[in-house]
Every structure is written in C-alpha cells, then in structure tokens.
Image: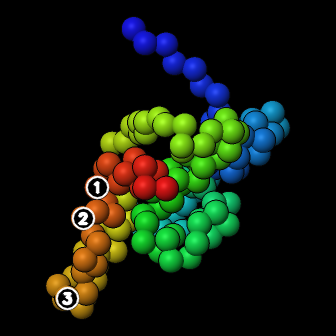
Amino acid sequence: MARVFISGFGVVSPLGIGKDAFFQGLREGRVAIRRVDSDLDLTGIEAKVAAPCDSFDPLAFLPPKRAKRLGRTSQMAIVAAKLAQEEAKFSPDDGGAVVVGTGIGALEILLENHASFLSRGAERVSPFLIPLMMPNAPSAEISIE
C-alpha cells in the first residue's frame, strides 16, 4: 500500500471558505443547516432543509469569464484545490494528480438548460451542457487550472 502525506487542504463549506473560517465555525458550534424552502421551489420534496454555502462567491477567486463557464460544483472544487495548493506551498510544476470523489455533476446546469429547452427551444441549450454537468468535470477543471 502506498503512503500518502497530506500537506495542505482547502475548505469550501457552509461554515465558511478556507480552513480558518471553517475551524472557527466548528469551534463556535455554528449550525449551517437551515430551511431553504423560501430560496427554492421544493414542491413535491419533503426535505426543506439544507446547508448551502451562502458565503461562497466564485468571483472572489475566479475571473468572471472562467466562473461563468463552470458549474457551481466545479467552481467550489477549483477554489478548494487552490486553497489546498497554497497551504501546501505546492507548485503545479512539482507534479501530482487530481483525485476527486463525486456522485453527480452540476445538476443545476442540467435543470437550467432543461428549462431553457422547454421555454425557448433546443437552440437555447448551452453547447457546453455536457462538459459542464459531467461528474468528472470538477477533477477535469482542477487539472486544467
């Protein structure tokens, strides 16, 4: 079995962005879970609570054009990876690999494009739909960075 050494980590969480904000939230015992039924149409969905990352602003970390071309999942993954890289004082020139575990891609991208398709037709579906919503998009985008 290969040994792994973790020299840095990045956090994008409902408690805050960055390890200091995250650990401060933990120490203070803050609860990030809240009702979200006023934020979203949850018709037909029993669960009305979530832990959204309200303080996450991709434009604080990514150029606007780049942020626009990414799903929220990839935006968060890139920021977490950048924070980890900075903490570890790791340079991409040092070599390495990207390993990201994910169960689903940027579902919001699929839903937005489905709504556009239904209301405005197929020509309004983004040509970037598939690459934006693929489950491996976050790891691919981190590698590109």
Q: Does any portion of residue 107 appear in the rendered image?
A: no
Q: Residue under label 2, please give it.
A: 130
Q: Residue under label 3, please give it.
A: 123
Q: Position of residue 9 (x, y in %)?
A: 63, 36
Q: Residue under label 1, please give it.
A: 134
Asked if disc 3 and disc 2 are in contact, CB closer than 8 Å, the reply is no
Which mark sits nearer the N-terminus, 3 or 2? 3
Give the answer, above or below, for where 83 lies relative to 43: above
Q: Position of residue 71 (x, y in %)?
A: 42, 64
Give the answer, above or below, for where 88 lies relative to 73: above
Extreme residue toward the bottom, this view: 120
Report how far apart the C-alphas of labels 3 and 2 lie in the structure. 15 Å
Local packing at callout 2 (Cα closer than 10 Å; few below 14, some 14-19, many 20+) is some
Can you tell which quarter of the image residue 144 is in?
A: bottom left
Q: Nearer the viewer, residue 35 or 95?
A: 95
Q: Is residue 11 left or right of residue 29?
A: left
Q: Residue at x 47, y 61 (%)?
A: 72
- Please state which amino acid type lies under the numbered disc 3: Glu
Report how far apart the C-alphas of labels 1 and 3 lie in the structure. 20 Å
Asked if disc 1 and disc 2 are in contact, CB closer than 8 Å, the reply is yes
Q: How is the image coloured?
A: rainbow
